[in-house]
Image (cartoon, coloured by chain):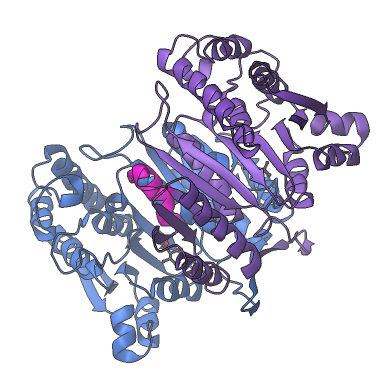
Chain colours: A blue, B purple
Amino acid sequence: DKYKIAVIPGDGIGNEVMEAAIYVLNALNINFDYVYGEAGDECLEKNGTALPDETLDIIRNSDACLFGAAGETAADVIVKIRQEMKMFANLRPVKSYPNTNSLSDNIDFMIVRENTEGLYIAGEESYTDEGAVARRIITREAEKRIIEYAFKYAKENNKSKVTGVHKANVLKKSDGLFKDVFYEVAKRYPEIATEDYYVDATAMYLITKPESFDVIVTTNLFGDILSDEGAGLVGGLGLIPSANIGEDAALFEPVHGSAPDIAGQGKANPIAMMLSAIMMLRYLGENEAANRFDGAILKVLNEADILTGDLGGSATTMELAEEVKNNL
Amino acid sequence: DKYKIAVIPGDGIGNEVMEAAIYVLNALNINFDYVYGEAGDECLEKNGTALPDETLDIIRNSDACLFGAAGETAADVIVKIRQEMKMFANLRPVKSYPNTNSLSDNIDFMIVRENTEGLYIAGEESYTDEGAVARRIITREAEKRIIEYAFKYAKENNKSKVTGVHKANVLKKSDGLFKDVFYEVAKRYPEIATEDYYVDATAMYLITKPESFDVIVTTNLFGDILSDEGAGLVGGLGLIPSANIGEDAALFEPVHGSAPDIAGQGKANPIAMMLSAIMMLRYLGENEAANRFDGAILKVLNEADILTGDLGGSATTMELAEEVKNNL
Ligand SMILES: CC(C)[C@H](C(=O)O)[C@@H](O)C(=O)O
Ligand SMILES: CC(C)[C@H](C(=O)O)[C@@H](O)C(=O)O
């Protein structure tokens, strides 16, 4: 097999962490054909658009896409890709690793975020200098699809519980619908435990009982907020990868941004990007390679010898990559 | 002075924590005239409405209102009161106390939450069984008012920084407006430092650098989510009071709910309700009494002898109240 991988490093540390991840990928003896595409702030400056059609085509014609980070234009780039490619499921694992600032050693849950609607699509139709109205759209179709995805994910990965998160006490119709659909789908998975919480309560429980969560499924913006909170739980964004999955396209990106403050200094933590590449390997069915890559990262974190600054070390991005490669 | 205080215990532990708070208030030698009003689930069952007009009148005719908690009907009761009484500012202090499960000893910030608009008012106009649209309304007037409130609060309380929280990268018009107004108002307070973050980043920073925050100002639902997260930071909802402030009305309530699981057992932690009563005392200008009450709670927490179950002790609600009273 030869895989066609769209590679979009983007801006800032996106370039650095991408180089590091690909450095390790290349040591796995899998045949990758990388096709590079541009997107982001620099691309905007150069080409007059932050997301050229050619880049979308590259993603369209790939087996999977690796995405680094975009700067100021992040919303225009990544939200547009998610929507154009109908990548409806955004998967964000939150997991405590050794020798990190994790609040607890036993955090391990997956946030399954709806990726196409909510407050992210409708735009703000009416606005003046005095006010604006944004529309939050919740459809049975999209929420059912994501909830089903979450339950399937739980089943296939031996997770015992799915938590539905909403604000149905205030958003009685839209999140009421989410809650109804959640329990409709749950009925078909009697072996999986279920619970539902309000989003505010969830924001508290993530801190007071993070070990209690297995799989969380929620609407778009709530998933955005809770996954960054999840990053905080396990020591920061340097360790949170993500997958954007659709019927015929998939994109893998770290949850962190382009970090202009440390860009170009070769000291960014590449682990979130590497973990994203591992999610890609599993998506492609390359589980053995994924396990090797994962095991190597775990060894490096366990040894805690060669770590980047955010993890308390002083290694460069590529020194860490080298160390991971040596531990494959 | 004789103060007319509207007292709405509500449901579940609302009754128990209210009794405890009033027990201590009565030992402060201030002349309070308590007028009790009904609201909540039990009230709905009894009177066919969760929020009778008489209760609204009692609040209207009071100098301040103490509110316990409502059960399933919480949204209908408390959101309606906030809107009817135009209580535009929701203040939620997050503070670490000794001998609690706080993530850090130096957490001390105030969340100033807009309390009248955002996703909380517009209702969901169009909905079918297949989908629903909620409208998120952001007006210059309401956001300017709350941002001004936050800066004034910072100034009067010697806080050095105000953080504006929004999602202007996605909600470009509405939260773009919030951000613009934030910096417009900030200009008039050159002595106060400012910063603005996306709500998702804030959810992370609250965990990774909670000590860095002084005053956070944000829109309605973001304030709801972040304040519960704040509760998690300092060991749970048992310690988070709140104030709802308008031009001619003010209501003080713990952020926690009616906790049906422990209701009626006399073991609820009354401190959030007591801290709410202290916020009321300050609102009424009774600063000396507020300081005494506050000091007594601090002593009880420092001694860590008489604490409720959520704080690792085994005292009852009223035993804790007795202990606070003895330390006045
Ligand atoms: C850049 C931004 C639009 C994006 C989002 O809100 O989805 C980011 O925060 C994320 O979580 O991927
Ligand atoms: C009960 C609910 C409607 C309310 C809110 O969302 O404002 C509560 O969560 C709060 O924070 O006071």
Q: Specify whether B105 is left or right of A268.
A: right
> In which of the image's four quarters is ligand 1 placed?
bottom left
Of A254 and B289, nearer the camera is: B289
Q: Specify whether B83 is left or right of B269.
A: right
Which residue lies at the image location 20% right of the left edge and 55% below the top edge? A269
| Quarter of the figure with residue B126 | bottom right
Of B10 and B247, nearer the camera is: B247
Q: Specify whether B269 is left or right of A47.
A: right
Which residue lies at the image location 58% right of the left edge and 25% below the top edge? B289
| Quarter of the figure with residue B136 | bottom right
Please, which residue is most extreme toward the front here? B1
Of helix, strand and loop, which mostly describes the magenta segment?
helix
A121 to B117, vertically: above or below: below
Of B40 and A34, nearer the camera is: B40
Range of residues picked out in magenta: B200-214
- For the image, the number of numbered tags is 0
A234 to A249, vertically: above or below: above
Where is residue A22 drawn, in percent x and y? 18, 65
B307 to B171, vertically: above or below: above
The stretch drawn in magenta includes residue B201: yes
Of A303 and A89, nearer the camera is: A303
Where is residue A204 drawn, in percent x and y? 50, 38
Can residue A134 be seen in this snapshot?
A: no
Please, which residue is most extreme toward the right here? B47
